[in-house]
Amino acid sequence: MKKETKRKILSFILPPIGAFLIRAIYLTCKKEYKLPKNIPNEPFIVAFWHGNLLMQPYLYKKIRKNHKIAVMISEHFDGEIIAKTIKSFGFESIRGSTKKGAAKVLLQAIRKLKDGYDIAITPDGPRGPIFSIADGIVAISQKQDVYIIPFYYKASKFWQLKSWDRFIIPKPFSKLTFIAKEPFKVTDMDKESAKNFIKTQMIQY
């Protein structure tokens, strides 16, 4: 079987299975939410680590029940699987990377913000290094003067993949703790200061 054909089959089969498993895990788990006191009415940027992606739709829906959001996702094959999986949760996607074809994807993100969408970004994606902050989140936030809200979840029991991002898969019947930090802006900071500040906010849970 050709690689392209195999990928087409997998991109058709895996997303609905993935969405079903995410829902099944969530339903079996105990949940705790720690939410910010101040949530902007205007569009904002959601930031979370690539390895902490799996259950994020539920944290977002807790904060914004009926709001438009677009997730920045790489054009790699695994990005295709992720994009199709999150579509079943009502999430749109912006395909591309702030490291490759940066101008195009940044313009798409800015356009979405202007149209009232929130934007979700994994600052260390799509290929790491882990817990790094790419320039894109700074550029978008500063250009549009929008808030950033770090998202995070932890599971009392989980599997952790040996991938570069140490991807976490919660085990059924564990406890999920969802955390969203208070919104902040980096508008008046230089690029390196902004990246350091974002990283500090994202690792202090």
Image (cartoon, rainbow, N blue to C red):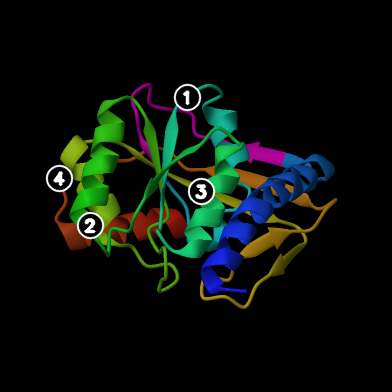
Quarter of the image holding residue 107? top left
Q: Amino acid at mark 4?
A: Asp
**Image quadrant occupied by the N terminus:** bottom right
Q: Amino acid at mark 1?
A: His
Q: Which residue is at the far front?
A: 1
Q: Amino acid at mark 2?
A: Ala
Distance between mark 4 and mark 1 Cα atoms: 28 Å
**Which residue lies under the disc numbered 4?**
188
**Which residue lies under the disc numbered 3?**
83
Q: Earlier in the sequence, mark 3 or mark 1?
A: 1
Distance between mark 3 and mark 4 Cα atoms: 33 Å
- Say left or right for 141 vs 37: left
**Which residue lies under the disc numbered 2?**
102
Q: Secondary structure at mark 1?
A: loop
Q: Secondary structure at mark 3?
A: helix
- Quick one: label 2, few (<14), some, or many (20+) residues within 10 Å? few
Q: Earlier in the sequence, mark 2 or mark 3?
A: 3
Q: Tags 1 and 2 in contact by the CB under 8 Å rule?
A: no
